[in-house]
C-alpha cells in the first residue's frame, strides 16, 4: 500500500499450494501493516485492522478447491468498532473471536459484532503500558476453564471476557518487557491428564530501552517463564533457552512439543531496526545465517530438531 492509500502493483497476499507449488497472487486493497488474524472453525481466515485505510477494516479469506479461484473479501457492511493496530485475535468456544488491544486501544470487541455491541474498556492494557508501548500484541490463551490468560509487557491476568472482569492478577514475570516492541513469544502447552490444567510459557524478549534507543546491539533475553495458569496460587518458574531471542515464533507440533523459530539475538522490534538485526544475527537463533536448526520446548527439556519439516514465512519491513 503506497502512502496515498491507493492500489499499486505489488502483491501483498498469495496462496501457496504444497502440491502444485506456484504462489497465486491474491487481492488486498487496504493496508494490512501490523494487523492480526485468526482461523475460524470452518477454516476461514479472519483478518482485522492495520494502518491507514486498513485501520478499521475486516477481511475474510475462505479457502476453496485448487481447481477454483478464491480471493480475499474486504467487508463493506461491517467494520471494527475501534481502529486496531498491533492487536491480538483469539477464538472463543462459541466460534466467535475476541479482538484485544492495539496501539491506543485499551479495549476489546467481538466478531461477529453482537446486536447493540460496543467496545469494552480493558484497563489492564493501560496498566501494562510503559514509555515504549510494551503492551502491544498481547499474548492471549483460552484456558480450559473458559477464561482468558492475557499477558502484556511483564504482567498477566485471568480475564472473564463474558462479564468483563479480571478474576486474578498473576505474579509479575521478572526480566523486563516481553511484548511488542520488545517481544519474545508465548504458547500454551499441550493439555494432558483430565485437560483441566494449563501451562503457559513466555520466552525471550528485548532489553528495556532497546526500542527507544534503537539499540540494535542490546542483547536479547534467553530466559523463559512458565506458569500453571489454572492453579490456585500460580508462580512463575524460570529457565533458559540455548539462545537469546527476540521476535521469535512458537508453533505447536503434533508431538506436543513447541517449535521456537525465527527472530534475532539483539535489538528490538520495529521497522528498519528489525531488518538490520536479522542481517547481523541471523534467523532461528543460530550462530550463523542459514544454519538449519530450531529449538523445541517440551516440559523442561530443550531439543534441537533437524529432521522435522516446516514451512517458514518471512516479511519485509517496508510499508
Image (cartoon, rainbow, N blue to C red):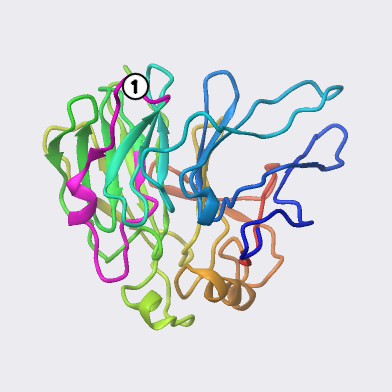
Reading the image, the residue beneath label 1 is: 114
Nearest the viewer among 296 and 60 is 60
The x and y percentages for residue 113 are 38, 26
* Residue closer to the observer: 264 or 67: 67
Give the quarter of the image for residue 80: top left
- Magenta: predominant secondary structure element? loop
Q: Is residue 166 above or below residue 170?
A: above
User: Does 130 sit above or below residue 20?
Assistant: below
Q: Residue at x 31, y 73 (%)?
A: 208
Q: Which residue lies at the image location 23% right of the left edge and 24% below the top edge? A: 162
Q: Position of residue 274 (x, y in %)?
A: 54, 71
The image quadrant where one finds the N terminus is: bottom right
Q: Is residue 197 left or right of residue 59?
A: left
Position in image of residue 297 (x %, y %): 46, 46
Helix, strand or loop at label 1? It is loop
Q: Nearer the viewer, residue 275 or 254?
A: 275
- The local crowd at label 1, few if under 14, some if 14 to 19, many if 20 or more residues have their Cα within 10 Å, is few
Q: Is residue 132 above or below residue 37?
A: below
Q: Identify which residue is drawn at 82% across, 43% down.
A: 23
Counting from the top left corner in percent of width and height, residue 84 is at 41, 48
Please give left or right for residue 116 compared with residue 270 in the image: left
Query: Which residues, given as a range, are shown in magenta?
Result: 112-140
Residue 221 seen by the camera: yes
| Residue toward you, 150 or 37 | 37
Find out whether residue 79 is within the magenta segment.
Answer: no
Amino acid at each position: 500500500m503506497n502512502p496515498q492509500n491507493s492500489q499499486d502493483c505489488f502483491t501483498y497476499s498469495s496462496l501457496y499450494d504444497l502440491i502444485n507449488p506456484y504462489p497465486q497472487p491474491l487481492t488486498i486493497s487496504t493496508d494490512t501493516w501490523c494487523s492480526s488474524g485468526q482461523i475460524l472453525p470452518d477454516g476461514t481466515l479472519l483478518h482485522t485492522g492495520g494502518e491507514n485505510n486498513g485501520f478499521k477494516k475486516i477481511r475474510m479469506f475462505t479457502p476453496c478447491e485448487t481447481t477454483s479461484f478464491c480471493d480475499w473479501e474486504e467487508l463493506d457492511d461491517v467494520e471494527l468498532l475501534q481502529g486496531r493496530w498491533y492487536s491480538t485475535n483469539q477464538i472463543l468456544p462459541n466460534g466467535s473471536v475476541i479482538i484485544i488491544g492495539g496501539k491506543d486501544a485499551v479495549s476489546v470487541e467481538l466478531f461477529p459484532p453482537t446486536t447493540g455491541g460496543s467496545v469494552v474498556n480493558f484497563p489492564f492494557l493501560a496498566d501494562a503500558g510503559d514509555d515504549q508501548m510494551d503492551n502491544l500484541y498481547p499474548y492471549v490463551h483460552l484456558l480450559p476453564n473458559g477464561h482468558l490468560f492475557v499477558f502484556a509487557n511483564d504482567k498477566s491476568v485471568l480475564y472473564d471476557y463474558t462479564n468483563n472482569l479480571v478474576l486474578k492478577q498473576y505474579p509479575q514475570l521478572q526480566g523486563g518487557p516481553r511484548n511488542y516492541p520488545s517481544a519474545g513469544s508465548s504458547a500454551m502447552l499441550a493439555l494432558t491428564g483430565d485437560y483441566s490444567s494449563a501451562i503457559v510459557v513466555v520466552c525471550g524478549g528485548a532489553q528495556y530501552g532497546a526500542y527507544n534507543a534503537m539499540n540494535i546491539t542490546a542483547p536479547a533475553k534467553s530466559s523463559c517463564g512458565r506458569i500453571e495458569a489454572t492453579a490456585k496460587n500460580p508462580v512463575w518458574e524460570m529457565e533458559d533457552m540455548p539462545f537469546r531471542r527476540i521476535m521469535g515464533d512458537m508453533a505447536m507440533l503434533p508431538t506436543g512439543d513447541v517449535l521456537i523459530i525465527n527472530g534475532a539475538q539483539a535489538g528490538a522490534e520495529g521497522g528498519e531496526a528489525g531488518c538490520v538485526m536479522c542481517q547481523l544475527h541471523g534467523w532461528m537463533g543460530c550462530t550463523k545465517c542459514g544454519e538449519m536448526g530450531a529449538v523445541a520446548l517440551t516440559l523442561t527439556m530443550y531439543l534441537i530438531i533437524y529432521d522435522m519439516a516446516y514451512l517458514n514465512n518471512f516479511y519485509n519491513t517496508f510499508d
